[in-house]
Image (cartoon, grey):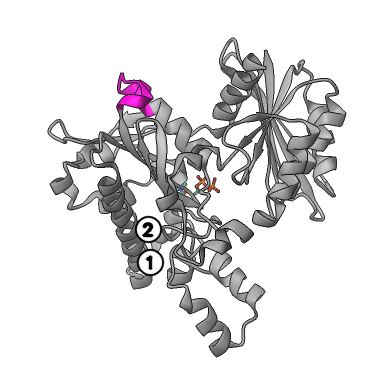
Amino acid sequence: MNILIINTGSSSLKYQLFDMEAATVITGGVVERIGESEGILTHKTFDSGDVQKNIITRPIPDHQAAMHLVADQITQGIDAVGHRVVQGGESFKAATLITPEVKKAIEANNPLAPLHNPPNLIGIRVAEELFPGKPQVAVFDTNFHQTIPEKAYLYALPYSYYTDHRIRKYGFHGTSHKYVARETARLMGKRPEEVNLITLHLGNGCSISAVKGGECRDTSMGMTPLAGVMMGTRCGDLDPAIFGYLMDNTGLTQSELDEVLNKQSGLKGICGKNDLRDIHDQAAKGDKNAALAVDMFAYQIKKYIGAYAAVLGRVDALVFTAGVGENDEIVRAKALDGLDFLGIDIDEAVNNVRNPEAHTIHTADSRVQVWVVPTDEERQIAIETQAVLDKS
Ligand code: ADP
């Protein structure tokens, strides 16, 4: 069975076509700068180790045009389509076959993810037109976090804000946390139910999850992806009074401040850069704020590890993933420094060697294993899409 995975962002569209029997990617790519004067499609076809690349630049006015452009590139048969949808709210505990009712329920979650769910829905509608009669499945970023207990997902606000306005922690990057948790258990020779893990998805966006016996029990992002550890440009956890204080004292409007917290804060807010490769270069040249940004980031990650060790009671492994988690040995070493009292001990020499495959970086004596596992959200969506189709 060939399953096409569609992941629509606010101005991008990523796709991959999986051959599920062979467990391989046949073709895939990304459309970027949708809605800008010049859009770009990068399409790759994989054929027994060879990669053929095709780049098309032209105005791509909207997601509908992007989907048509992608469909024109794919010459192979498609049996089903799996869609990444960011916000499933409480309506969706698991991946779901898309029906008219499901589309309505996704639309009802639009206010909770105004930048993401509407393009996700366009992706679904256009895919239905382009591939008529083929089953379509939605896999939500929030699914994996629906096992978080009430005491962990509620904010200490008037309870009616939860019942009337759906204010609660939903969590994000769920597909990535689930994929690396399953993959790490497999690599440890265990079933997911047998292990307690702290999964650290550290990319431009960052989230950390406590995963007990295969189920998520807490995660650092909140009602929106702004909460948790500081990120490339997002502030992470803040004293909530700061928002009103800044509105009163700077004259910035709510939407201007929102932009500051999302796009001008985090690592960038502290040192002017959000890519850790640039930040390490600057720190090496003596830039104090660059070094401070790395210290703050590592400190905040460390605090979540401590908190989630307490939530889990027993930790079998930590799992680093995504751009920073997979590649940045400095952040990993700093975040884990001094955690030997929790049984976490990494081998600095092994940590310093880049390895694109899943691997461990702990010492032989470390009670807790420390893994670096490349994430593969598209593959996880394909696996879940197939599971939904097998059941239906
Ligand atoms: P996104 O959240 O956009 O999917 P990624 O998971 O691709 O992000 O992570 C992107 C970030 O990963 C970059 O901004 C950079 O900080 C970091 N990164 C990528 N490669 C490296 C590297 N080799 N060394 C250090 N950091 C890296």
Residue 45 visible in the shown view: no
Residue 185 position in % (x across, y down): 35, 25
- Left or right: residue 190 versus residue 54 is left
Classify 10 Å Cα crowding around label 1: few (below 14), some (14-19), many (20 and above): many
Q: From the viewer's side, name the closer residue of 289 and 2.
A: 2
| Picture layout, residue 363 above or below residue 292 | above
- 195 magenta-colored: no
Q: Secondary structure at mark 2?
A: helix
| Residue placed under numbered mark 1 in the picture | 290
Residue drawn at x 29%, y 54% is: 302
In what element is the residue under mark 1?
A: helix
Indicate left or right for 46 with 194 as reference: right
Q: Which residue shows up at 76% across the image and 39% down it?
A: 103
Residue topped by disc 2: 280
| 334 lies above or below 22 | below
Q: Are the two marked residues, 1 and 2, in contact with CB atoms closer than 8 angstroms?
A: yes
Image coordinates of residue 239 in percent, x first then y, are 43, 73
* Quadrant where the C terminus is found in the figure: top right
Q: Earlier in the sequence, mark 1 or mark 2?
A: 2
Q: Mark 2: is the Cβ under 8 angstroms from ligand 1?
A: yes
Give the residue type that dot 2 points to.
His
The numbered disc on residue 372 is: none
Question: For the magenta stretch, what is the residue range?
Answer: 184-194
Report if residue 363 is visible in the image: yes
Q: Position of residue 63 (x, y in %)?
A: 80, 44
Q: Residue 26: x percent and y percent? A: 65, 19
Q: Is 75 above or below relative to 236?
A: above
Q: Distance of mark 1 from mark 2, alpha carbons? A: 7 Å
Residue 352 appears in which quarter of the rendering?
top left
Give yes or no for residue 191 being in the magenta stretch. yes
Q: Residue at x 19, y 49 (%)?
A: 339
